[in-house]
């Protein structure tokens, strides 16, 4: 039992939270590419991504492995994301730090999703039963290249107006 749930139920909840985090993260990334803040989606993305990493440590494993390393990296990255967004308010270089770390956290979730897809989806598992075959490597390379490209574009494009400017613009248009 984990948090009062069977292992199967806990796993399902963990997967659902992960998928919600990925979906919310993609909305946040789309907003960044349009230089728009999507505060609610951002909070959902950050919360579910943190919960995904934390719950990943709760699975009964006997030794530290890649999931633990990725979870730890994700939590460190997310700490910078939170500081950049909520403490430093995207001022100066913190804007680029926020975008880079948020996109990297989303990439890590997608990296794990690809790993899980190759483990759990029969068609993909047949292509890479050991997880080190060319099909798996190509899929991960494509995901990495896509996130590097999207992250670079997001850093270049995400220049949202400060909240005070947004409030003043809304007041004058009313």
Image: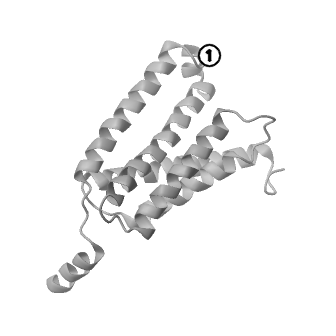
Q: Residue at x 20, y 85 (%)?
A: 171
Q: Is residue 112 left or right of residue 169?
A: right
Callout 1: helix, strand or loop? Answer: loop
Q: Residues within 10 Å of mark 1 (few under 14, many from 20)?
A: few
Residue 56: quarter of image: top right
Between 21 and 154, the residue placed more toward the observer is 154
Give the x, y percent position of residue 65.
Answer: 69, 33
Give the x, y percent position of residue 166.
Answer: 24, 76
Q: Residue at x 37, y 38 (%)?
A: 147
Q: Is residue 83 above or below residue 24?
A: below
Give the x, y percent position of residue 139.
Answer: 45, 24
Location of mark 1 (residue): 129
Q: Is residue 45 visible?
A: no
Give the x, y percent position of residue 89.
Answer: 37, 68
Between 165 and 112, the residue placed more toward the observer is 165
Q: Is residue 81 above or below residue 9?
A: below
């Amino acid at each position: 039992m984990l948090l009062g749930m069977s292992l199967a139920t806990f796993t399902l909840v963990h997967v659902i939270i992960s998928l919600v985090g990925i979906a919310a993260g993609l909305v946040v990334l789309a907003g960044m590419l349009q230089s728009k803040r999507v505060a609610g989606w951002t909070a959902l993305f950050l919360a579910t991504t943190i919960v995904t990493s934390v719950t990943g440590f709760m699975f009964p494993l006997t030794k530290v492995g890649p999931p633990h390393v990725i979870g730890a990296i994700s939590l460190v990255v997310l700490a910078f994301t939170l500081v950049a967004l909520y403490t430093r308010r995207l001022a100066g270089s913190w804007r680029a730090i926020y975008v880079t770390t948020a996109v990297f956290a989303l990439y890590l979730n997608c990296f794990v999703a690809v790993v899980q897809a190759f483990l759990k989806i029969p068609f993909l598992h047949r292509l890479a039963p050991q997880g080190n075959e060319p099909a798996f490597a190509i899929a991960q390379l494509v995901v990495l290249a896509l996130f590097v490209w999207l992250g670079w574009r997001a850093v270049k494009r995400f220049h949202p107006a400060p909240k005070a400017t947004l409030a003043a613009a809304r007041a004058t248009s009313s």
